[in-house]
């Protein structure tokens, strides 16, 4: 095992990003169970944490990536990907079955690299570097979001809840 990687999920993320030639840096931290908690322990503003939300649409699993400071808007996601009215958040059991190499709640935003369609909100791209889940609750990965989108072959679409403002006008933190 690579020094500094105590978990197989983090090692898998490191290997996937290396193979895709994405510059990245692993961040170890005490266990966290939400993107906002990870932001706090890693001393990163929540707007610079890329939160991966796993959704399902009649068995089709999809990753939606939004800043931790925001919420996914299922109606916007539905419109962006022409999903059925049945698109919803995946259950823990569905996430565990779809991504057995990663801990539930720590699925990395690696889209095609892990066999899932991925949609990234443009707010994630406003930061030069974001912290994303690295497969377990004890690691995050700092990465250039543009490189991440390219490696994951992700689609970029407005999928965040807006709070009454256009996404381009809203602060990240």
Image: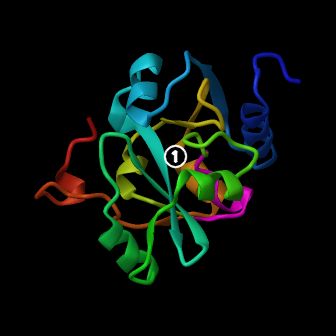
Q: Nearer the viewer, residue 97 or 156?
A: 97
Q: Is residue 22 left or right of residue 148?
A: right
Q: Quadrant of residue 84?
A: bottom left
- Magenta region: which residues? 108-117
Residue at mark 1: 145
156 horizontally vs 153: left or right: left
Name which residue lies at 61% across and 59% down.
94
Q: Residues within 10 Å of mark 1 (few under 14, many from 20)?
A: many
Q: Specify whether residue 115 is painted magenta.
A: yes
Q: Residue 13: x percent and y percent?
A: 72, 40
Give the structural element (helix, strand or loop) at label 1: helix
Q: Is 133 in the magenta? A: no
Judge left or right: residue 9 versus residue 43: right
Task: Give percent across and percent down for residue 46.
Answer: 35, 33
**Is residue 22 left or right of 105 when viewed as pictured?**
right
Please, is residue 160 above or below residue 32 in the view?
Answer: below
Residue drawn at x 21%, y 42% as measured from the top left: 171
Q: Residue 101, image x and y in percent? A: 76, 45
Residue placed most toward the observer, 154 or 31 = 31
The image shows residue 5, relative to residue 170, as above or below, that is above
Residue 73 sits in quarter: bottom left
Name which residue lies at 76% across and 17% down. Answer: 4
Instruction: Estimate the x, y position of residue 107 in percent, counting from the top left.
Output: 60, 46
The quadrant of the picture occupied by the N terminus is top right
């Amino acid at each position: 095992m690579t020094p500094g990687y105590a978990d197989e999920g983090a090692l898998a993320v490191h290997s996937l990003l290396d193979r895709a030639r994405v510059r990245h840096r692993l961040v170890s931290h005490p266990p966290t169970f939400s993107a906002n908690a990870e932001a706090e322990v890693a001393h990163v503003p929540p707007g610079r944490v890329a939160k991966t939300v796993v959704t399902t649409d009649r068995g089709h699993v999809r990753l939606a990536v939004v800043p931790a400071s925001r919420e996914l808007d299922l109606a916007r996601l539905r419109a962006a990907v022409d999903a059925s009215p049945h698109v919803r958040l995946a259950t823990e059991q569905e996430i565990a079955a779809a991504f057995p190499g990663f801990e539930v709640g720590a699925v990395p935003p690696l889209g095609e690299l892990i066999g899932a369609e991925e949609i990234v909100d443009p707010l994630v791209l406003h930061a030069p570097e974001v912290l994303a889940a690295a497969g377990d609750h004890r690691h995050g990965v700092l990465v250039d979001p543009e490189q991440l989108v390219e490696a994951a072959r992700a689609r970029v679409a407005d999928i965040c809840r807006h709070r009454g403002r256009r996404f381009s006008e809203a602060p990240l933190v």
